[in-house]
Amino acid sequence: MPHNLNGTAFKLNRRCALVLGSHRSGTSVLSRALFAAGVFLGESLYGPRFDNPKGFFEDQITNQLDESLLNRIKRLWNSLLLPDSVDPEVISAYQNSLKKKVFSRFENKPLWGLKDPRISRLWPYLLPVFVEAGIEPIFILANRHPYSVASSLFKRDQMPEAQALALWVVHQLDSMEALLQHGGLVVDYDLMMDRPRQELHRIAGFLGMEAQLDPDEVTKFESEFLADELRHSCYPDETAASVALPLQALCLEIHSELLNLAQLPGGFTPEAVEHVRTLVTGFRSEFDRSTDWMQAIDALQAALAKASSSPVRAVASLECEARLLPTSSATSTLQVASDLENMASLLKNSLVRRDQTIAQQSLQLEKMREELLRAEAQLDLLKDLMLGGREEDRL
């Protein structure tokens, strides 16, 4: 039975599971579970990489379109704040590309899925495309302990804790808005690791696919795909909320509520919706107090991105963005200040490395120039000898 999206009547048996959740929160594991439950994920998936050795299960074209949209609105994958408004022409171009390059490839699939952490924040721009195509979107949110996510982001991207935790919050809150408005399911990463068979049956039941669940696929997912090395850290204890800094405490509260929702047999119940709606309003109000330092972090992150293309502009940008550092005592903590200093240090180190690279390239160019001059001299000598030889032959 299709979910009803604000009264929209969708075509029977045309559904798409949208995987939501922050970066490094277990969205790849959830996507693999969807595949085991019979969801078609496409034939153009990113392959394994050092930071995801078992694969991303993520459609390359969807990822590229999402990244292109962020670029056009002058944001990055790790930006904490998105613009309040976006040029309608930019959104229209994005939606047309989705129709032509993504939806067209799944038009014969009754149940398919898309995974890209960026969808957690861009989903409002995708909805009109689903409505127009008559495809029912099904939202499934991956939840993982924010400390585990922060640890993973630091290991992969050297991202400071404050930025990583704030990034987790914005993804989870935006995802919760989708579930509040349109229904959905929460799946916890640690519960999946602890009881994979039970969670896989829970997901399949939510999708109405439990009767078609292949026992061999369940075994393969449980025994071959999941492994202890996928879980590098685990923080099951929420009691530290009373001694945590404000941002950490907020993260623990959100995670605790999502963990409760992840233990419901199915999707959101009417009671859960009302409870969560009240909580999300409070969470957003509390989080909005951090806007000043989030702007500062985004500005420094943008300066870091510029450093990869222009060291001179990056230095000027750093001097300019330094004025955006927060001064409000209500939101500025020692931890946040330390993280901002770390990001500034990352930028300076990036500039040093860029200067060293430029110096090395200059030396290489100078050597190449000298070699070219020697080669030209040798060619001139050879030419003189050849001409001289021909002159003697003529005499």
Image (cartoon, rainbow, N blue to C red):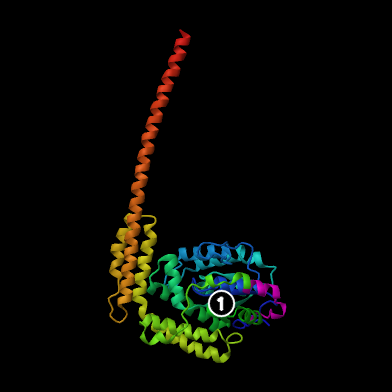
Left or right, 157 with reference to 44: left
Q: Residue at x 36, y 70 (%)?
A: 297
Q: Residue at x 67, y 68 (%)?
A: 107
Q: Position of residue 380 (x, y in %)?
A: 40, 24
The segment highlighted magenta reads: 206-222
Q: How many marks?
A: 1
113 and 210: which is toward the camera: 210
Q: Is residue 265 above or below residue 133?
A: below
Q: Is residue 245 magenta?
A: no
Badge 1: residue crowd in 10 Å (few <14, some 14–19, many ≥20): some
Q: Quadrant of the C terminus?
A: top left
Disc 1 designates what residue? 193
Seen as rendered, the residue at the extreme bottom is 271
Q: Residue at x 34, y 71 (%)?
A: 339
Q: Position of residue 196 (x, y in %)?
A: 60, 78
Identify residue type, mark 1.
Met
Q: Is residue 207 magenta?
A: yes
